Image (cartoon, helix red, strand yellow):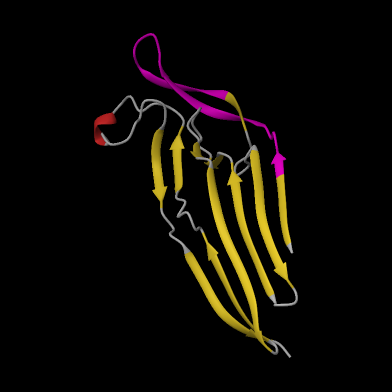
Amino acid sequence: QFGIRGYYTYTDSRITTSKIFRFRNDEGQLTSREQNQTRPLQGQSRHISNLTGLYKNSRTGTDVQLSAVFTGRRIIGVSPYYENDIWQRSFWQVDLSAEQRIGYGITLYTKINNILNTPLRAEIPRANTLNPQEAPYIDTSTNTLVREDFFEQTWLVGLRYAL
């Protein structure tokens, strides 16, 4: 009646593209040149894993799953500039789904997503040396946070009838 299911995936994707590299020349003028950069494919996490706890009782009509999914950091925005891609931080997401048979052909079900209220945090993996005073509450010494979205939990509850 109880079970555990899990998986882990490691992916090492790489692509080399030409990017714009901006710098000051010997005369102090801002100029640029094309420079190759190797990076993972956009949206591709190196590490992805899932662990699900299961309970199923066919006699009582109970079916419950609690899943935890880990997604490693990944590029969510490719920049035309060298070393300026936007990366989403690694995150965990926990979801629950449950069904309970309550009568002939009638099932009560619920699905709860993002139980931990995991936000999306995106950053450029370079220090912000130009204007760190604009966000004194954020550590900009190694990364520059460019986006933070909160999605909250979502709940779905309903009845299903099947003949």
Q: Main secondary structure of the magenta part?
A: strand
Q: Is residue 66 left or right of residue 6?
A: left
Q: Tell me the quadrant of the picture where the N terminus can be found.
A: bottom right
**Left or right: 62 with respect to 148?**
right
- Range of magenta residues: 8-35
Give 104 or 78, whichever is nearer the viewer.
104
Q: Looking at the picture, how far across and down is residue 119, in whole percent?
A: 45, 50
Q: Nearer the viewer, residue 46 or 116?
A: 116
Residue in the image at 40% along x and 45% along y: 147
Above or below, 19 against 94 in this view is: above
Locate residue 44, reporting x and y percent: 63, 42
In the picture, the quarter occupied by the C terminus is: bottom right
Task: State whether residue 26 is above or below residue 50.
Answer: above
Q: In the figure, 53 relative to 38: above or below?
A: below
Q: Is residue 5 magenta?
A: no
Q: Residue at x 75, y 77 (%)?
A: 59
Q: Quadrant of residue 29?
A: top left
Q: Residue at x 64, y 39 (%)?
A: 47
